[in-house]
Amino acid sequence: MASETMKEGQDRYKSGVLPYKKMGYWEPDYKVKDTDVLAMFRITPQPGMDPEEVAAAVAGESSTATWTVVWTDRLTACEMYRAKAYRCDLVPNTGEGTKTEAQYFAYIAYELDLFEGGSIANLTASIIGNVFGMKAVKALRLEDMRIPVAYLKTFQGPATGVIVERERLDKFGRPLLGATTKPKLGLSGRNYGRVVYEALKGGLDFMKDDENINSQPFMHWRDRFLYCMDAVNKASAATGEIKGHYLNVTAGTMEEMYLRAEFAKSLGSVIIMIDLVIGYTAIQSMALWARKNDMILHLHRAGNSTYSRQKNHGMSFRVICKWMRMAGVDHIHAGTVVGKLEGDPLMIRGYYDTLLDVHTPMNLEKGLFFEQDWASLNKCMPVASGGIHAGQMHQLLTYLGDDVVLQFGGGTIGHPQGIQAGAVANRTALEVMVQARNEGRDIWNEGPQILQDAAKWCGPLKAGLDTWKDVSFNYESTDTPDFVPSATTSV
Amino acid sequence: MMTNPGNKITQGQFSFLPPLTDVQITAQIKYALKSGWSLAVEYTDDPHPRNTYWEMFGNPMFDLKDPAGILMEINNCRKTFPSHYIRVMAFSSAHGVESPTMSYIVNRPKNEPGFRLVREEAEGRSIRYTIHSYATEKPEGERY
């Protein structure tokens, strides 16, 4: 279809209200430039609204437009600054004859000069700043973005990256193993460090603070840091391996976070942690600090499900992954497929690819709507955490691969023979499964038998498998691919 | 004696498994070769967790694609250094990796004394930690 844009000139700038389509925000013939920032939105128009007009409105309101014509546009290179909606497709399995009201995928191109280099805050203020409240859309979801190489090069990227993290930790060719200290709340510093020591000595690589462990009355942060680092170093001496504990430095101000990070560094910690709720700018600042201080930076995605889970409104987690890789974190929680938290296998693979690829091809089945060249930005390690246990090792390794931190919190600390035994069970299950996969065995089908065979010589693994053999979380995912249906099963 | 589960240093991919047989080692070599990686054999008598540079038993075998030949190198190293730690490493030269991709121990001394944690009390309640390897109290080559 042809563009309906009015010619630039007197008629275009008559005072009053013009449809966005006619103001230049709908350009179906637009030829996308390599330097454009691209965004794809899922639009649910208000009843009776023309989807292309709504797409144009989203383009307009996320770039130069306001609700009425303004003559001051004519002082600028306004045609260049206007975002252009260039494609609008009906979403499969929505609209007439289906159970879901009509939704549309709207593709929008943004001129690079609309954005400040190196600022996630600026990028997001445009792309998700105003448009989600517009009356013309009933619901709106940011599904994916293509960040041009020119813009990526203005970002630091992960402070350490997967490759250097592995080199520093001296751990290659297998997923890393971690656990979150439990109970999350109430342990004193001394008691907390006990859990850390037992799990690390037993065989885990990392222990972790939870997202809401900061500095509460039952355990102030300095106590936690001191006891945890004694546990980490003692476990390192006991095993001959480098160990770590993600010390959560999340606090109310940047000043306080820097203070806590400096203390972690002075104690010799290899890794610190922040929560997504501290905000994009704070995350970028901590990433700069981490790069400068040889620190791995772990990010907990606290809060993301408030806007990423529902399919019709908010934003996809894959976009968060993109922004966080740009912002510079080294770890991010990205789903388990088989555990207790939301996750369709293909969608989660899409998040993992987004974090780890050098170059990501377009893949609609994984929800990747754009090809993405990562411009040699470091890789960001995905973390799988929440309701996973040793009995799922074959599924975890198949779905998630080697570059992931598998976090077995309950699966370690809840082991019937104790925390060290829990760690032994998880590490043994992991090693035996990596070995089998490398030997060319079909671990997807033979996995349970491989684990049972190892349980014959590894008592802790046997006890773990017996305890959790029937635990699985089989719920339908809410955020599923639009192009290929797939079930989340954990059997 | 080390008191961790297994009573041994747990570096590498497979330290929680029973010692790998030659058949099992060969299977891992084949996996590395199939992945396009080069294999290397390294040995040390200083297994400190931050001792990155173990001695190379020759350069990485970039041009050797025969698993039997690589196993022979591993066994030569074992014969030469029967009481050292020996590890097999794989290296990827692919863009975006260019780093080790595998590392597993295939030989270790009979007795592993392990490490002492040295705590130096600093200001406040801070402590500076050093991990000291008991074995390095003796000179290189006389440790195990």
Image (cartoon, coloured by chain):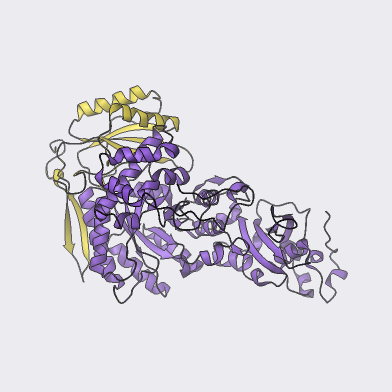
Chain colours: A purple, B yellow
Residue A174: tell me if it is visible: yes
Place residue A444 in its image quadrant.
top left
Name the residue located 40 percent from the left edge and 47 percent from the top edge: A392
Name the residue located 41 percent from the left edge and 43 percent from the top edge: A394
Horizontal and vertical percent position of residue B116:
16, 52
Task: In this rendered view, identify the residue nearer to me: A76 or B114.
Answer: B114
Name the residue located 62 percent from the left edge and 66 percent from the top edge: A128
Residue A402: tell me if it is visible: no
Horizontal and vertical percent position of residue B141:
15, 35
Horizontal and vertical percent position of residue B29:
37, 30
Place residue A70 in its image quadrant.
bottom right
Q: Is residue B108 above or below residue A170?
A: above
* Residue B135 falls left or right of residue A491: left
Figure label count: 0
Name the residue located 20 percent from the left edge and 35 percent from the top edge: B84
* Residue B8 falls left or right of residue A25: left
* Residue A66 falls left or right of residue A18: left
Q: Is residue A82 above or below residue B89?
A: below
Q: Is residue A254 above or below residue B72?
A: below
Horizontal and vertical percent position of residue A417:
24, 53
